[in-house]
Amino acid sequence: MKILYVIANFLILAGILFVCCRKFVLRLFSDRRRRILAELDEAERIEKSLPPAGPGPEPVSDGQVQKGEDPQISSALEQEKIQAEGRISQIEAFGERECREIYRIMIGKTKRRFFQIMQEKVADLFSREPYLGRMREKEAGQIDEILGQIKLTPGDMAYLKYHDVLYVTLTSAYPLDPALVKKVDEATTRLLQEVNGKTSLWVREDPGLIGGLRLRIGDTVYDYTVAEELYHYEKGISREPITTDEPVREVLEEFEQKAESFAPKIHIYQLGRVLQISDGICWMDGLADIMYGEVVEFDCGERGMILDIQPERIGCVVFGEYANIESGSRVRRVGRIASVPVGKALLGRVVDAIGNPIDGEGYIYAEAKRPIECRAPGILDRASVSRPLHTGVKAIDALVPIGRGQRELIIGDRQTGKTALALDAIINQKGKDTVCIYVAIGQKDTTIAEIKDRLTQYGAMEYTTIVAANASGSAATQYIAPFSGTAMAEYFMYAGKDVLIIYDDLSKHAVAYRELSLLLHRPSGREAYPGDIFYLHSRLLERSAQLSAELGGGSITALPIIETLAGDISAYIPTNVISITDGQIFLESELFREGQRPAINVGLSVSRVGGAAQTKLMKQMSASLRTGLAQYRELADFTQLGADIDEVTRRTLDAGAHLMEALKQGRFQPLEDWQQGLLLFAVSEGFAQEVPLEEMSGVEKGLFLFFEEKHASLVEALKTGEKADAALLEQIRSALGAYQKRS
């Protein structure tokens, strides 16, 4: 009967939540529904205005329509009904998609209510016979098993150096036999005598334990209670989605079957106490054995990560709502380093900084978990960067080539196209067996949604994961987001795959870390940044590498983004990241305003990998490109003074202008390697010299189409990426001449 009572309560609660959510959807789309319902009412009025059908139509002569019946009105009425019903179904589907987050919150509340009901049911169950008698009979055996496992931790030993007494607390759900209490006192006293310490035993009763015993020595808890079993049972269930009442009924039936032979197990963990909580930073005492980066859990269910360890207190950042945490409440050591889910299940999804889905597309069944902080591959574990990662952008692949395993910085002022370059690189990886991770740090929700829609439009989301730490989130989530994205990328790298990861951007990441450091009362340095800001980014970017063949040959290619102010690349954070990476792509505001897209400054952009990250064909075709552009920029600056120029200089300027125009490229229009090489060869050889600059984009498209249709054999030769010999170059020149004459 009690199970039926619990199920009935849950169904009533679920029904209330469903009704509330339906009302919210109706309010959200009331205008559109009102218009459609008005159209249906109008259609119904027209239908009622028609005469009712009689027993049968009277025969009419040819060409005569029966009185009162209009075929056009009937047809329009039927079509309007179909369209209106279709629009209603679309609105309902759209409303459900928009309200998935609300559904998720309500389901979470339903879960918590379900666990509360389950705990009440279990407490009532174990307060009656025969369960009460069975639990009391096991107390002596539980004491023996607990005493067989007690030991002093390094934290207890350190505590005893400054204090004479170590407190011991024995808690039970019911009054204990004095003989059992004496047994515990003697065992703990002997344990402390080995290190010349003393104990102070406290005995308490707590009906909330439901049944069993709990012994706490210092910070360590040896828990043999029913309440602790329920805690782990709840955590196991909460990992699975509960969207209907079917799983709930199954869980209740399963638990009642287990209750017949229920026997709790011993759980060992450590507890601390909250001293102070403010601005997302929690200060605690206790937990002397905890490590940096470890996860803790508060009584309210929120979790945090240790970021500061001091002699008298421990500081941690809170991932969730820190307003739910109270001073004096208990905090539990989870026993693991902060980690995130990894695997193929995350591809195509948008997750937050700790790996939870935020795209409303359902639960993620991850293959494994991986720590967000991990040691970078050693020197012997790495191989040289020798394979190109094509971005599809002419100015990058020709001038500042990127290799797999390289770290290439994208730097420039805001609104100069940094994110656009990164997205083009992701889109260009389609069909190339490369996994992409895009880490959005401090971006607006609308910007992240737009990026996801754009990647979906070009078919890139199927191999991409977006890790979003939006601007409205806490500094803690913005701090750990790039580390979480790198952990997801490392899973694929060590599986032998190639990964491209974008950090957009590390300037906001540095600001978030500065905020956390100041709240943790760490000393500030230059520009108020902490002294380890360089180490922060170096340990992040050093995890990107090309692994050796013995480790599978996988790679992580990193494209960190840094935002400058007024083009100042000598500022603190830009110089730090420049010294860590293997080159930089500098986007200049002046070039951007002049219409040069992408606005890459050739003089300040460099790749320290160089030609090793290019195909032989691209290396051959772009050999003189940088020199020609440098000459053009220098002469262009000189001629701005109004000096007279000779014919040679004019031809040089004209050739440079055509090169600059050829390097222009629209967004989301990546080119293949052979197309880039062919275009650069054609411009450098002077085949576009007579083409007006404003017609260069049309010539480019026509050139590719002409070669694909008329010279397919040359295209196949170029696609191999091998260096073109003299004969092949002559054939290309001949084909370019034919195209020039035709156009």
Image: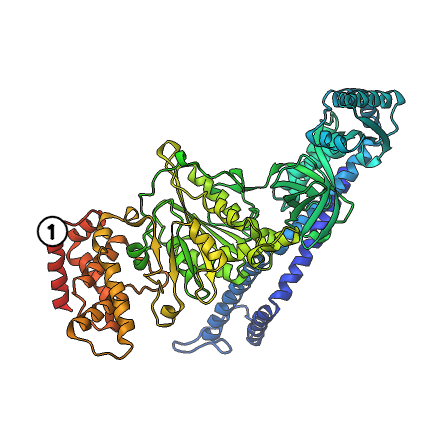
Q: What percent of the width, then of the height, locates residue 708?
A: 20, 57
Q: Give the total of numbered labels.
A: 1
Q: What percent of the width, then of the height, locates residue 409?
A: 41, 54
Give 606 or 9, whichever is nearer the viewer.
Answer: 606
Indicate the colouring scheme: rainbow
Give 253 or 638, whichever is nearer the viewer.
Answer: 638
Kindly identify the residue that appears in the image at 68 percent across and 57 percent down: 19
User: Which structural element holds mark 1?
Assistant: helix
From the viewer's perspective, is 54 left or right of 578? right
Kindly identify the residue that appears in the image at 24 percent across and 72 percent down: 693
Query: Label 1 belongs to which residue?
Result: 726
Q: Please indicate, yes or no, whether residue 474 appears anywhere in the rendered image.
A: no
Please identify the quadrant where the C terminus is shown. Answer: bottom left
| 659 versus 272 height, above or below | below
From the viewer's perspective, is 239 left or right of 624? right
Please identify the quadrant where the N terminus is shown. Answer: top right
Kindly identify the residue that appears in the image at 77 percent across and 31 percent down: 216
Q: What percent of the width, then of the height, locates residue 537?
A: 50, 49
- Residue 218 sits in quarter: top right
| 565 versus 97 height, above or below | below
From the viewer's perspective, is 78 left or right of 606? right
Mark 1 surroundings within 10 Å by alpha-carbon count, few (fewer than 14), some (14 through 19), many (20 or more): few
From the viewer's perspective, is 337 left or right of 116? left
Q: Amino acid at mark 1?
A: Ala
Kindly identify the residue that appears in the image at 32 percent across and 56 percent down: 396
- Residue 643 sits in quarter: bottom left
| 162 versus 453 height, above or below | above
Q: Please indicate, yes or no, whether residue 433 appears anywhere in the rendered image.
A: yes
| 27 versus 386 height, above or below | below
- Residue 341 sits in quarter: top right
Q: What percent of the width, then of the height, locates residue 635?
A: 25, 70
